[in-house]
Image (cartoon, rainbow, N blue to C red):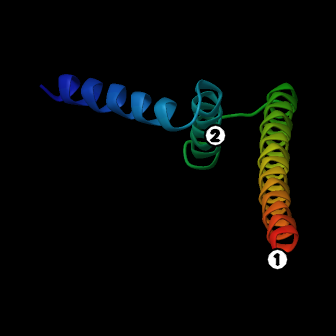
Amino acid sequence: MNCVWSLRDSLLRIFLVVGKTSALTMNIGGVVKDWLLIAFSWSVIKDSVTPLNLIGYGLAFLGVAYYNHQKLQTLKAKEAEKKSQQSDEEDGILLTEREQG
């Protein structure tokens, strides 16, 4: 019964996250979860971490950081474009009112 409940919970979470964001965001969440598991196994269980492992974790971290940077830049650009369009619409209304007045 516990495995059925866990499966339902996992599937529900996946559909909710992917529905609100994207599949790429879900994958990045998986990478972060892996980092937490690795940190736990290294600090608590005293599992060994090789230099090659550290290079791989570093590359994954840089990839996630780059993705977040690009996503933030895209959101800022969309917001600036939206503000510019609103300003243009307001200017058009003012010009129309001046021409009529």
Say which residue appears at 79% left-offset and 47% top-offset.
78
Q: Where residue 86 appears, x then y in whole percent?
A: 77, 59
> What residue is at 50 percent from the left and 30 percent from the top?
18
Q: On the image, which quarter does residue 42 sit in?
A: top right
| Residue underneath mark 2 | 32
Residue 28 relative to residue 69: left or right: left
Contact between labelled residues 1 and 2, with CB atoms less than 8 Å apart? no
- In the image, is residue 17 above or below residue 88? above
Pick the front one: 17 or 83: 83
Question: On residue 88, which mark appears?
Answer: none
Q: Residue at x 70, y 34 (%)?
A: 48
Q: Pick whichever, 90 or 59, lies toward us.
A: 90
Q: Quadrant of residue 32?
A: top right
> Which residue is denoted by mark 1 in the rendering?
101
Residue 74, image x and y in percent? 82, 43
Q: CA distance from mark 2 to mark 1?
A: 60 Å
Q: Position of residue 21 (x, y in %)?
A: 57, 36
Local secondary structure at mark 1: loop
Q: Nearer the viewer, residue 63 or 59?
A: 63
Amino acid residing under circle 1: Gly
Up/down of 44 relative to 54, above or below? below
Which residue is located at x 65 percent, y 39 percent? 35
Pick whichever of labels 2 and 1 is earlier in the sequence: 2
- Extreme residue in the front direction: 100
Q: Is residue 14 left or right of residue 41?
A: left
Q: Nearer the viewer, residue 95 or 17?
A: 95
* Amino acid at dot 2: Val
Instruction: Assign the C terminus to one quadrant of the image.
Output: bottom right
Tell whether 12 sits left or right of 101: left
